[in-house]
Image (tube, coloured by chain):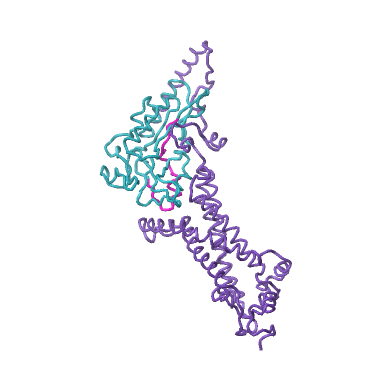
Chain colours: A cyan, B purple
Amino acid sequence: MARMKFLCDADRCIECNACVTACKNEHDVPWGINRRRVVTINDGKPGERSVSMACMHCTDAPCAAVCPVNCFYTTADGVVLHSKDLCIGCGYCFYACPFGAPQYPKVGNFGSRGKMDKCTYCAGGPEADLTTAEYGSRENGQFTGYGSNRLAEGKLPLCAEMCSTKSLLAGDGEIIAQIYKERVVRRGYTSGAWGWQTAYRETIAS
Amino acid sequence: MARMGLVWSSLMGALSLCLVAVTTLPAVAQQQPSSVNPMAQSVKEQELLKELQRIQGRSSLPDARTRVLEQPGRDWRHFHQVTLRWIGAIVILGMLAVLMLFYLIRGMVRIEGGRSGRTLVRFNAFERFVHWMTATCFIVLALTGLNVTFGKELLTPLIGPEAFAAWAQWAKYAHNYLSFPFTIGVVLMFLLWIAWNFPTGTDMRWLKEGGGIVGKAHPPARRFNAGQKMIYWVVVLGGGAAAITGYLLMFPFYATDVAGMQTAQMVHGIVGMLFIAIMLAHIYIGTIGMQGAFEGMGKGEVDVNWARQHHSLWLENETRKGRVSGGTVAPAE
């Protein structure tokens, strides 16, 4: 069974934010929620690197561990999804996530932040695949669903598909690790497969 | 099969790298990595995280929180899932065990000489209202708070995930809304009883003689003895800490960033667990631990013999002011 992962090649990312825009458009993500973002380290200085970051779909996901209502589940592909019906909007998953993936539509209002929303690896949610219930709609300003389910159609996440430099890779962990290593060997340097040690407990060198 | 491919490609990689290194050596324009295996020199994520604590850069999105690339969430996860649960289990179950043992050994502290039938006012209506409002809120806050830490393990096997999520949703609302009357109650209690809760010499003697509950002494006490003063300060300071951290949690990122939120949650959790354990002792002594104690906060009046036994100085004071029915301080016949 394929184990789905993300790999952002920080040496290729040009910070074009196509991944951010693609994700936002595809899933009709509401205002204020950024499932994917591009962070630039050492902006303007030598050694500037940009990394596209969303949910890494960790092995032993910390968000799942701390959730007081156990609304997370991991699919057979290794994708970490959650149920908005069970979510109580407490915010703990954000405190535990090393990458800041969970997002909330409301701030404050007596601690109710609304239902958590995050990158789904374009794999939807617990509702039946490819239904409008799964895609969701805007009700009272709340985003009720999870967005489109590309994985059920046999496609890969749109952010990686739309990446202009193919720095963001998504797919089976073994295959994208292989692609990355070939690139590294060819060009002779690397800044590392960002996030892999934290998310998957493995380095790209292993 | 994949392993062989890996070995092969690594070998090819190393070979081609040597080639690259050899051909580019004459061009000294940039620094070249000296190691043959480029992967080994890659960014050591864990070390970087440990050194910087938080890795952040710049992001084109207007939300400032998107600047953070990685933060040490795992420490907080370990605290919440492991450490806090151990702390809670040990202090709360431990306190229950101690109280049970104490009751079996010492039993209920009886009023010496039995009830006299004469009473005096101990707490007026407003004081009682404030106490019970705060106490009821505390019970609900304690149970719903414990639900956040222990609920999913204990209740999901009993009622299933949907029912548990619905209960947890309402528990969270209850916890957040009842925090307001609780905080108001704590502030009122602080103001109402501050005058009688400063430590004095009488308290030192009371403590040295075991407060009368350990041993057979009858140390005098004013309106509140040392044990009660400790409870007062625990409620005021602990309740204050829980309220402040609680409101930080309830209005996320108004005053702190994610590290501050994690710290606030840790303080809130630890204070909560200790608070519950100590209040169990308070509830014990106010109900089954001591005969004649509950009515002080229940009806507002206590028996004179009870007062003489436990708060003799206070009884003298009240008698002098003419607030005791029957007038004299003589022992009941």
Q: Quadrant of the N terminus of chain B?
A: top left
Q: Is residue A195 above or below residue A185?
A: below
Q: Position of residue B13 (x, y in %)?
A: 44, 22
Location of residue A77 with respect to B99 vertically, above or below: above
Q: Tell me if I can see residue B178 in this picture.
A: yes
Q: In the drawing, does residue A16 fall left or right of residue B48? A: left
Q: Give the magenta-colored segment's residue range.
A: A51-73
- Look at the picture and state if B24 lies above or below A166: above
User: What x and y, as percent, mark residue A18?
Assistant: 37, 29
Residue B61 falls in image quadrant:
top left
Where is B203 relative to B154, above or below?
below
Q: Nearer the viewer, residue A90 or A125?
A: A90
Q: Position of residue B6 (x, y in %)?
A: 41, 28
| Image point (47%, 19%), residue name | B17
Pick the residue in front: B263 or B30.
B263
Q: Is B47 positioned to the left or the right of A134 in the image?
A: right
**Residue A166 shown left or right of residue B133 in the figure:** left
Q: Residue visible at 55% across and 69% down?
A: B126
Single out the residue that lies furthest toward the top: B26
* A112 in the magenta segment: no
Q: Position of residue B313 (x, y in %)?
A: 70, 75
User: Residue B162, located in which quarter of the rendered image?
Assistant: bottom left
